[in-house]
Amino acid sequence: MQVQVVQTSPFEGQRPGTSGLRKKVRVFQQPRYLENFVQSTFDAVQPPSGATIVVGGDGRFFNREAMQSIIRLSAANGIGRLIIGRGGILSTPAVSNQIRTRGAFGGFILSASHNPAGPDEDFGIKYNMANGGPAPEPVTERIHACTMRISEYRTTDTPDVELDRTGRLSVGAMEIEIVDPVADYAACMERLFDFDKIRALFQSGFKMRFDAMNAVTGPYAIEILEARLGAAEGTVVRGIPLADFGGAHPDPNLVHAHSLVEEMFGAGAPDLGAASDGDGDRNMILGRGTYVGPGDSLAILAAHAALVPGYSSGLKGVARSMVTSGAVDRVADAFGIEHYSTPTGWKFFGNLLDAGLISLCGEESFGTGSDHVREKDGLWAVLFWLNILAASGESVLSIQRSHWRRFGRNYFTRHDYEGLSSAMAEQIIGAVTKQIQNPAPDLRLQRAFEFDYTDPVDRTKSSGQGYCFHFDEQARVVFRLSGTGTEGATLRAYIERYEPPEGELDLDPQAALATLIHCSRALAGMDRLGISLPSTIT
Ligand code: VG1
Ligand code: CO
């Protein structure tokens, strides 16, 4: 069955380079809107007849409707087999794992990640490739181009498929396999980490709290932490995925996971605290009375990789997004391995991982991952920490402190100015660009430039990936506009300063960075534009 499409591209208002669509649910509910994206994706990636495609989502509002529509379009587009998580559920890293282990041609992930869910909130869809990773820019540009010239889509006239029971069924000639969303992922984790050691740690009385934020990681964390590793029942809180995430904002950071933060800094705090986001690819790590910033977390995982079975033979190299603190670079230098710095977004790590250039990578936005899949992986990072704690017998705080004493500390903070009008965002970018072209002498800048990236593997160029201001080798401010918001513009200011091992290592980052924070506002002309304090500080 063919249906005429007469509408503008669903990408309208979004940068063509972004990995997928992220919009308000009401936008997705428009007739033919989602279908336009799905058909355009098939047109752009041309799955061979009989191909296998994985489909999973974080369970948010509109997940099931979108799933049914993808099933119909897949059947009409000659897909041979769909692998779907039971209830339409698969975390983002679990989709990546399914694509890889089942040799699928690609997959759809239904999620708007850490953005809130519900009828008035956000929905999203993105396409991942056969390596399990987000489509790279040339492919997303092709998808975008197809959405502009599409005139019809192919679908079937079949009833909804029952998603809540594992098993096999079919729609026309297409087979559907409804799989347990957790089993294969948990098996992957068992291969990487020393489950016996972690089990012994929990048996010795070690306590942890995992906040799944009413989102997709709940079933994964309950099965792996409580059922397989023996953590006390109730270790996982907010463990049932809800269609509106219980009204919460499932972004694991100091602001949105505040109840976890309070518990970890309060009396009788457990030994380890962790949280994950809507689709399970982010993580936040806390110890008793301490918080581990994502840049430090990546560096600490790299420094202790020898303790973890899946990584004990050594790291090939490491990567971070450019805006992430340089803490991991220092570990790489000490180990004599390569370190890379990429534009923001996981897709840039894919080529490095595929080419075997790196084993670990991460972003300051609470994303950490490795070559086991091609997405960041929240629970994986938590298990990595558990493995380190179990193998070393140390606390989170002592690991963090000795890391700083050995490598020094990269003080880091991100200041987000959310909900700006596009006119305001333009003015800020105008001010910042002017400073790059003609820096004010009183700021004593060493170097000001826009970050351009050439992929070391396929030489693809990505320009304009951030406005960088280096005050000296050890201090910098970087600005970029968010590409994932659905309301107004968000400016992110990334502020960092290195303190050597013999310096002051225990300061509060906001205090340690006060001068640079001031400079960041001056560079962007914030006071002149009447922009008050940032809306989120992490
Ligand atoms: C944000 C983060 C970025 C991350 C992206 C997707 O993008 O800053 O590091 O890769 O979200 O993460 P932006 O353009 O808003 O800064 V997820 O967990 O939403 O897939
Ligand atoms: Co996410």
Image (tube, rainbow, N blue to C red):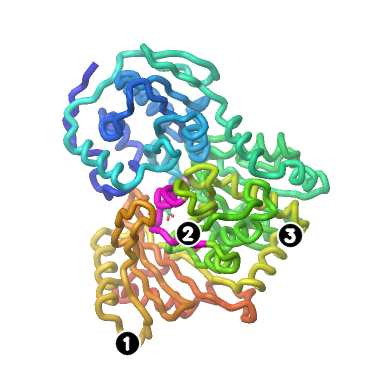
Quick check: 330 above or below 346? below
The quadrant the N terminus occupies is: top left
Name the residue carrying label 3.
395
Q: How crowded is mark 3: few (under 14 residues within 10 Å), some or many (20 or more)?
A: some
The tag on residue 441 is 1
Name the residue carrying label 2.
320
The tag on residue 283 is none
Query: Spatial distance from mark 2 to mark 1, Cα to Cα?
Result: 31 Å
Q: Is residue 53 shown to the viewer in this render?
A: yes
Query: At x 33% / y 75%, what residue is drawn?
Result: 448
- Which element carries disc 2, helix, strand or loop? strand
Give the image location of residue 268, x and y in percent: 76, 56
Left or right position of 203 against 127: right
- Which element carries disc 3, helix, strand or loop? loop
Query: Spatial distance from mark 3 to mark 1, Cα to Cα?
Result: 46 Å
Tell me the amino acid under the disc marked 2: Arg
Which one is nearer the viewer's eye here, 83 or 302?
302
Residue 341 counted in the magenta span: yes
**Highlighted range, magenta:** 338-352
